[in-house]
Amino acid sequence: MRALCGLAFCAAIAACSPAEEAPKGRVIDCALAGSMKFLPDCFVEDSRVGERRFLTVRHKDGAFRRFEMVDDGRGVVAADGADPATADWSSEGVLEVSVGNDTYRFPARMKADAPQS
């Protein structure tokens, strides 16, 4: 009987533990925690709240950042947190966005009237 109770207890604990789940979304390159090396380790999902458009970038370790898409040439701005986002357009059509020690590369198209960096 004790063995059965112990087994039931282990099964109950296992049922409460969340399974490791890979982030969902499109893969993008990112350089995290001050790294200079970009790897395809981040995942981005699009969402809308009313007329506002957001990108949520998830790291493999569970951390995430949210950006609001803007139409003023900047591309995105930080939607959460205290750190501002800085964005630079490359000639290859990549929007490189930095927040704190993290940098993300979003494939994007620059508006014709957007300021060049």
Image: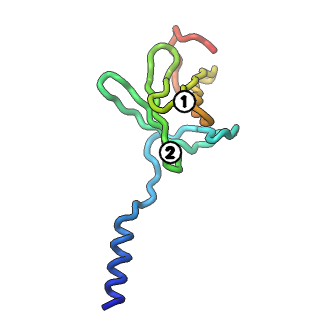
Describe the colour scheme in one phrase.
rainbow
- The residue indicated by pointer 2 is 63
Q: Position of residue 101 (x, y in %)?
A: 62, 36
State the separation of the CA atoms marked 1 and 2: 15 Å
Other-residue count near label 2 (Cα within 10 Å), few / some / many at <14 / 14–19 / ≥20: few
In the image, residue 71 lies at what x, y percent?
44, 16
Placement of 110 over or under 13, stated as above or below: above
Q: Residue at x 35, y 75 (%)?
A: 11
81 relative position to 9: left or right: right
Amino acid type assigned to the residue bearing label 2 in the image: Ala
Q: Residue at x 34, y 29 (%)?
A: 48
Q: Earlier in the sequence, mark 1 or mark 2?
A: 2
Residues packed near mark 1 inside 10 Å, few (<14), some (14 to 19) or many (20 plus): few
Discs 1, 2 touching: Cβ within 8 Å: no
In the displayed image of the protein, which residue is found farthest to the bottom? 1
Tell me if 96 is positioned left or right of 35 in this view.
left
| Three-letter amino acid code at the position of disc 1 | Asp
Q: Which residue is mark 1?
A: 83
